[in-house]
Amino acid sequence: MKLRFLLGGCVAALASQTTCAQSSVTFYGRIDTAIRYSTNQNIAGDKLLELTSGGASGSRWGVKGSEDLGGGMKAVFTLENGFEPDTGKAAQSGRLFGRQAWVGLSGKLGTLTVGRHYSPVYNVEFANEPFGWANVYESGFIYDNYTGGNRWDNSLFYQYKVGPVSGSLMYGFGEQAGSNRNGNKLGGSLAYEFGQAAVSAAYQQTHDAQGVADHKVWTAGGYYPIGALKLFLSYLNHRSDLTPQKNDVWATGASYAMTPAVELYGGFYYDRQREQDGNKRTVVGMFNYKLSKRTNVYLQADYSKVDAGYASNVFDVYAFPTTKDASGAVTDFIKSRASVMAGVRHQF
């Protein structure tokens, strides 16, 4: 249950007739953990049984709120912590508020916030991906590999919406003396809603400590509901000045609300690695059952297959196990792996 507190400049018991600016603060969170069984976890093909954190979504708790400043303007903020319920550790490298931490102003001219935000590409892919960036390992690789970071520190984020059209701009300071380019990030997004459907696109570019564009990414996609069925399609293009490797990623899938309590999800992901003529194919399915408005259990299964060209992917966070010679060339690699997972999630 979300706890909401209304904070006024006046106490109701005083029966003051002065109009008082209202504030709202919401405390919220979710706990998600699962048992996962996976194949081919090393070059010997060994299997792994584990208790994992955040099978369907990252566990978190947070505080968000706003204050009415008058004249159509308000102050807004969000502080969100990520944690691992299987160990109790803080996620996002031990940060106190690793998921989000920002404050700003919102009014007729849009919303401007400063702090730690989700990146433009993340926000668009979140809307256009059937699992909504769930922590499904074999689909999550696409975004962890190629976005240059799902969250940006030290960033300015501007959002504006007029009618069915919305857009955003984001800039992340590199904070390195002598050069504004070194370590900085910039990007933006544009979306158009028509009825319950929408299309959107985003571009972002990040620079390393030497000012080299290590990730240049753009994405486009959309979703379209047909009754209880919702269809998704997206494309992501990744380039880097650090390597000639180029990747084109297609993702498609659907969600289906079979009953008010039963939901089905499915997705197919195809990653084409041009320079090495490599490919990765991933299929994911999930069954979700709602025990209540706040608690659900789920079953998930995934299967991925790669070829020799893809085994050399320098950006692959979830790299398939390989054997390399003295020169670094791949001599042997795991060609496929699969996993099944059962978990529970509670929201408050």
Image (cartoon, rainbow, N blue to C red):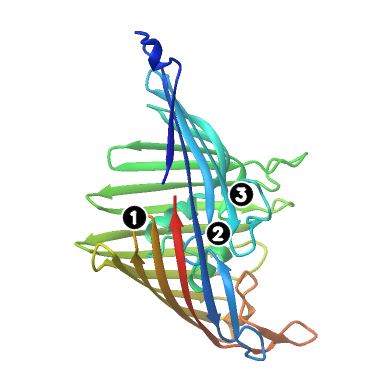
- Quarter-of-image position of residue 110: top left
Q: Amino acid at mark 2?
A: Thr
Is any part of residue 307 visible from this angle? yes
Which element type, helix, strand or loop, lies under badge 2? loop
Q: Which dot, 1 or 2, sits closer to the camera?
A: 1
Q: Is residue 272 above or below residue 5?
A: below
Q: Which dot, 3 or 2, sits closer to the camera?
A: 3
Left or right: residue 138 compared with residue 292: right
Mark 1 vs 2, N-terminal side: 2
List x then y, in percent, for residue 55: 50, 67
Q: Is residue 148 above or below residue 167?
A: below
Which disc, if any, is residue 99? none
Left or right: residue 160 compared with residue 154: left
Residue at 52%, 65% in the rendered image: 33
Which element type, helix, strand or loop, lies under badge 3? loop
Whole-angstrom CA distance, mark 3 to mark 2, is 17 Å
List x then y, in percent, for residue 183: 69, 48
List x then y, in percent, for residue 302: 46, 79
Residue at mark 1: 293
Within 10 angstroms of label 2, few (less than 14), some, or many (20 or more) residues?
many
Q: Amino acid at mark 3?
A: Gly
Which disc, if any, is residue 98? 3
Q: Is residue 199 above or below residue 238?
A: above
Whole-angstrom CA distance, mark 3 to mark 1, is 27 Å
Which element type, helix, strand or loop, lies under badge 1? loop
Residue at 52%, 63% in the rendered image: 54
